[in-house]
């Protein structure tokens, strides 16, 4: 009996140690938290209040202006050109939105200005133009697009944001971005973007499966200590995500909600909602 009790005790201690290590690993920032003013707004228009195929293509100045006029917060993406200029654009490649070959980083700003967004007359805007247009009227969630290790976008964007008077926070799928902000701008609210990567075929490769697993289960939090988690709402049941919100009281953003029904299902699990393809109804907006 005594031997069994000792064995059970060792197992209990081991389980407690593993659980403690896991919780420490996924823990968000708990001390010296920055201002969370951005999350007082509940609804953020995904890539501006856009509609592709019209005069308001995604991440365009008209789409951003439309969101400002409607009173929504805005989530948009930025990345850096070949000559180091931050521009507002989602995809790393130009194929879908501009019907051109290559990546944004392959072209200078002057070259990119020759392209149009889909069938509209709109060009790719610079980050500076977008900030001047918003002018602090609504809060921003700024997604930093970094494909691998080139962190120039962090430095280039920060030079503009230091003088910006509006409310904003940053987010990225790439933990290196959050680590840069942790080291260089700890006063800025930072968020880890994540998804159900292991459920996606493209991530089931030797190169991508480990990074995808680490980000999906928020293992990288141990070095980045994010202030919020922005998660694909379809995988809201992810244990690490739930613990960050419920146990550690970290903020949670849902992306990308595309209907009232999806919003209804996501509401109990998230604090703010990045929406697309519909407008949250009046009942939701009263709580915004």
Image: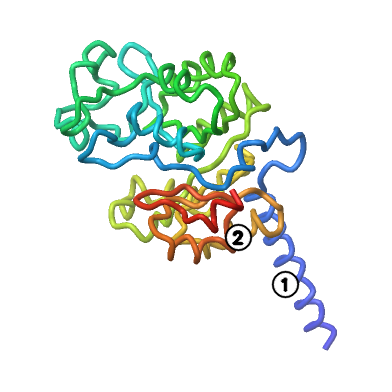
Relative to 243, is 122 above or below?
above
Q: Residue at x 36, y 61 (%)?
A: 199
Q: Residue at x 63, y 48 (%)?
A: 251
Q: Residue at x 51, y 61 (%)?
A: 266
Q: Is residue 118 left or right of residue 61?
A: left
Quadrant for the N terminus in the image? bottom right
- Residue occupied by mark 2: 242
**Image-quadrant location for residue 98:** top left
Which scheme is used to colour this image of the protein? rainbow
Q: Can you give x and y, in whole percent of width and height, for residue 280 in the image?
A: 46, 53
Q: Can you give x and y, in whole percent of width and height, for residue 94 in the image?
A: 22, 30
> Quick one: label 2, few (<14), some, or many (20+) residues within 10 Å?
some
* Front-most of residues 51 and 124: 51
Q: Can you give x and y, in whole percent of width and height, for residue 262 in the image?
A: 44, 62
* Front-most of residues 66 and 220: 66
Q: Is residue 274 left or right of residue 117?
A: right
* Front-most of residues 33 and 28: 33
* Front-most of residues 257 and 239: 257
State the separation of the CA atoms marked 2 and 1.
Answer: 26 Å
In the rendering, which numbered label is found on residue 11?
1
Relative to 270, is 274 above or below?
above
Mark 2: secondary structure: helix
Q: Can you give x and y, in whole percent of width and height, for residue 78 in the image?
A: 40, 28
């Amino acid at each position: 009996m005594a031997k069994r009790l000792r064995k059970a005790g060792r197992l209990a201690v081991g389980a407690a140690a593993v659980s403690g290590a896991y919780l420490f690993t996924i823990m968000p920032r708990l001390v010296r938290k920055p201002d969370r003013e951005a999350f007082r707004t509940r609804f953020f228009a995904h890539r501006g209040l856009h509609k592709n195929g019209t005069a308001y293509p995604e991440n365009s100045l008209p789409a951003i202006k439309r969101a400002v006029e409607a009173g929504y917060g805005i989530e948009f993406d930025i990345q850096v050109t070949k000559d180091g200029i931050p521009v507002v654009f989602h995809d790393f490649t130009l194929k879908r939105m501009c019907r051109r070959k290559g990546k944004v980083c392959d072209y200078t700003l002057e070259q990119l200005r020759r392209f149009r967004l889909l069938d509209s007359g709109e060009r790719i805007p610079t980050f500076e133009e977008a900030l001047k247009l918003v002018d602090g009227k609504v809060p921003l969630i700024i997604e930093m697009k970094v494909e691998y290790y080139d962190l120039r976008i962090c430095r280039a964007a920060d030079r503009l944001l230091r003088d910006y008077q509006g409310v904003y926070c940053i987010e990225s799928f790439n933990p290196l971005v959050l680590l840069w902000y942790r080291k260089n701008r700890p006063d800025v609210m930072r968020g880890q973007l994540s998804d159900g990567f292991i459920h996606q075929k493209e991530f089931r490769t030797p190169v991508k499966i480990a990074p995808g697993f680490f980000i999906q289960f928020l293992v990288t939090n141990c070095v980045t200590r994010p202030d919020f988690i922005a998660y694909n709402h379809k995988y809201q049941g992810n244990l690490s995500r739930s613990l960050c919100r419920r146990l550690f009281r970290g903020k949670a953003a849902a992306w990308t909600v595309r209907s009232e029904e999806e919003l209804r299902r996501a509401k109990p699990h998230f604090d703010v909602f990045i929406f697309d393809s519909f407008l949250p109804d009046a009942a939701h907006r009263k709580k915004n």
